[in-house]
Each structure stands twice: as C-alpha cells, then as structure tokens.
Image (cartoon, rainbow, N blue to C red):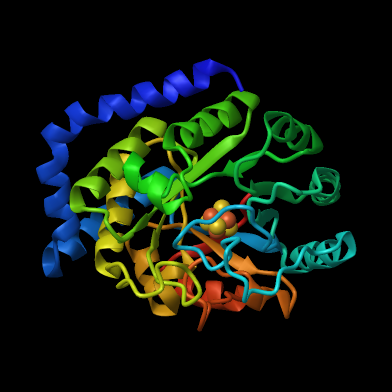
C-alpha cells in the first residue's frame, strides 16, 4: 500500500492534540451527563437523525462466515490464543442458504463478517459477494485488514462497503490491546479502502480498560476527521475467554451519550449502528439516542454460538420481528438499506 495513506493517517492523528485541548471539556461534560441533560442530548440526536435520514431504521443481515483469526486482541473471545473455542469456516453452500433467507425477509444488505484470517480463501469470499449482488443484495465486508489486492478483488466482485473499526484513538492502548498492531496502519487501510471506492465504516469500543475520558473525546474528534459513511460504538463487555475477562464492563450510559454525540457531530455519516453490545433493552435506548441500523443474525446454528468478540454468554441474536418491535416502540419505520 502506498506511503501516502500512512502519511495521511499520521497527519490526522497528530492534528487531534490541538483540537482536543479546545474541545475536551465540552465533550467530557456531555459524555458524563445524566438524567434530564442526557435525555435532552438524545432528543437533539433524534432531531438530527430525522433531518439527515428520516425516522427510519435500516436492516442488514449479519452472516458470520468464520471465527478463525490470526490476531490476539485481548478483548476478544475469538483471539487466536483462545484454545477453548471450536473454530469454523462456513462452506459456500452454507453461506448461500443463509443469503437466500435475506430474500425471504426482504433484507437487501448482507454484512459478511469474519475474523482476520491470514488463510482466508478470497476466491470463495469473492464468489459469495457475487452470489449476493447477482440477487440484488448489496454487500458490506468486515474481514479485518486484508492485502491491498484483495480489497480491489472484492470491490470488483461487487462489495461496496467495508468496516474496519479503530477501537480507540489512543495509539499506545490500541497497540497493547491488539497484539502490537499499529493504529496508523489501521487508518491507512481505511483511507486506501475509500480510495478504491468503498464506503467506509469505523468505530470504537467505549469503556476499554486503560482508556480515559480524554481518549473518548479524542475518539469522537478522530471520527469527525475520518467522516465515515457508517459509525459505531460498542460497549466493552468482558468476554469470559478473553485476556480481559476480569475487567469491569464499560458504562452503557456513557456509550449512549457518545452515540448521540456522534449523531450530532458527524454530519456526513448517515448510518450509525445500533450495536447488539447494548443488550436487548439497550438497543431500544440506542435507537432513542440516534442510531438507525440494526442487524438481523443469519449465521446458522450451531456456528452462531461460536462467534463472539465480547461477552461469551447470553449473546444477543437479533431476529427480524424484534427489529420491527423495537422500531415501532420508538416511532421509527423499518426501511430498505441498499
Ligand atoms: S477483534 Fe477481530 S482481529 Fe481481533 S482477535 Fe477478534 S476477530 Fe480477531
């Protein structure tokens, strides 16, 4: 990958310090707000969502095609070091069966997710992308960092969105939590993906151990600079089989405030995910805080129980009628996401 993407990433990261010194206090005050102040923040986020995309919830079908991963992120139950997890890669036929379910549900966006697998069979993934797009199902990929040529190959096969979370804007923490990986490189991949033509998605995990309020404020500023097409915040929830299993969970309320701040400050980001890490009731709160994208899980059983980054018990597997119920409850309409 060309050096220019790394320079772009480094320049943006270096520019955050000055903005942070001006804006940190205001952002932190909003992150910590509670009661009526928090409700007002969420109300403003809902107004902004209405202005930007209307009172709609978009739906995508999430297919977790593999839990094989070469990395060792300390917050993740699928880290390579977890010997207890039974690994799987879905076959082409298993994946097409799941994709056909989307047609029946009239869901027109496939969200194809996998661990970062150095032995990934890119041809099979390309065939799956083409299988979906031939049936008018758009494809978002979440496969971690790939080789530059593989991004291009999958774009040519028909994929148009790619999600690569940066998790935290604190470069040292990023490296510590992600097995010595490099934040600048992560951002460089995002810039490269955008250059190819992908719409890019990224996001953070709120409440990761050793991160501070200052880090969260910087996360928001970095998201503003990246201006992604899709943004997300997950709440840290210690996976019982991860290296961080004994750490306390993140604050859901603070993550909800962060979500509203994203909605209010990311004017070029129409899509904000309603993460399943909020839990069933929390997802309704996330919609109330400004989110507008939910996933229906189409990974076949028993594989669906073996794909878990955060909490390994009581995993929320969202069904389509639940999305309809949540949406109706908060006065939103389920809409097609293409
Ligand atoms: S977060 Fe992603 S890259 Fe990291 S260990 Fe988990 S599946 Fe692998």
Q: Is residue 83 above or below residue 270?
A: below
Q: Is residue 241 above or below residue 255?
A: below
In the image, 88: left or right of 259? right
Q: Is residue 325 above or below residue 134?
A: below
Residue 215 in the image: state x and y as whole percent. Answer: 25, 46
Q: Residue furthest bottom?
A: 314
Q: Residue furthest right?
A: 93
Residue at left 30%, top 73%? 248
Which one is nearer the viewer's eye here, 176 or 311?
Answer: 176
Residue 86 in view: yes
In the image, 209: left or right of 269? left
Residue 330 in view: no
Residue 271 in the image: state x and y as whole percent. Answer: 48, 48
Residue at left 64%, top 26%? 196
Residue at left 14%, top 67%? 34
Residue 204 in the image: state x and y as whole percent. Answer: 40, 51
Which one is nearer the viewer's eye here, 89 or 195?
Answer: 89
Ligand 1 sits in quadrant: bottom right
| Quadrant of the rendering where the N terminus is positioned | top right
Residue 220 image-quadrant placement: top left
Figure disc tally: 0
In the image, 71: left or right of 94? left
In the image, 1: left or right of 159? left
Residue 98 image-quadrant placement: bottom right
Residue 115 in the image: state x and y as whole percent. Answer: 63, 56
């Amino acid at each position: 990958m060309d050096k220019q993407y790394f320079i772009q990433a480094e320049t943006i990261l270096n520019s955050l310090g000055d903005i942070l010194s001006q804006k940190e206090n205001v952002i932190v005050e909003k992150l910590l707000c509670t009661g009526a102040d928090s409700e007002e923040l969420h109300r403003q986020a809902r107004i902004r969502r209405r202005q930007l995309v209307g009172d709609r919830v978009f739906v995508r079908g999430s297919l977790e095609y593999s839990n094989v991963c070469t990395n060792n992120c300390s917050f993740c139950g699928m880290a390579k070091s977890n010997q207890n997890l039974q690994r799987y890669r879905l076959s082409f036929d298993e994946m097409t069966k799941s994709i056909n379910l989307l047609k029946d549900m009239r869901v027109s966006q496939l969200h194809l997710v996998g661990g970062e697998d150095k032995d990934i069979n890119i041809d099979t993934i390309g065939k799956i992308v083409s299988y979906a797009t031939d049936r008018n199902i758009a494809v978002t990929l979440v496969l971690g960092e790939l080789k530059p040529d593989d991004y291009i190959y999958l774009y040519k096969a028909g994929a148009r969105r790619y999600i690569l979370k940066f998790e935290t804007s604190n470069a040292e923490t990023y490296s510590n939590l992600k097995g010595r990986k490099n934040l600048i490189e992560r951002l460089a991949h995002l810039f490269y993906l955008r250059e190819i033509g992908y719409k890019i998605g990224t996001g953070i995990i709120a409440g990761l151990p050793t991160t501070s309020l200052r880090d969260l404020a910087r996360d928001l500023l970095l998201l503003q600079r990246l201006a992604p097409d899709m943004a997300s915040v997950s709440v840290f929830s210690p996976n019982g089989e991860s290296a961080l299993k004994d750490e306390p969970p993140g604050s859901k309320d603070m993550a909800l405030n962060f979500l509203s701040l994203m909605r209010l400050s990311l004017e070029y980001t129409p899509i904000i995910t309603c993460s399943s890490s909020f839990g069933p009731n929390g997802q309704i709160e996330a919609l109330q805080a400004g989110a507008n994208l939910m996933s229906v899980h189409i990974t076949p059983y028993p594989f669906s129980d073996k794909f878990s980054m955060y909490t390994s018990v009581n995993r929320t597997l969202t069904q389509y009628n639940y999305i309809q119920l949540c949406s109706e409850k908060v006065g939103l309409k389920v809409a097609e996401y293409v």
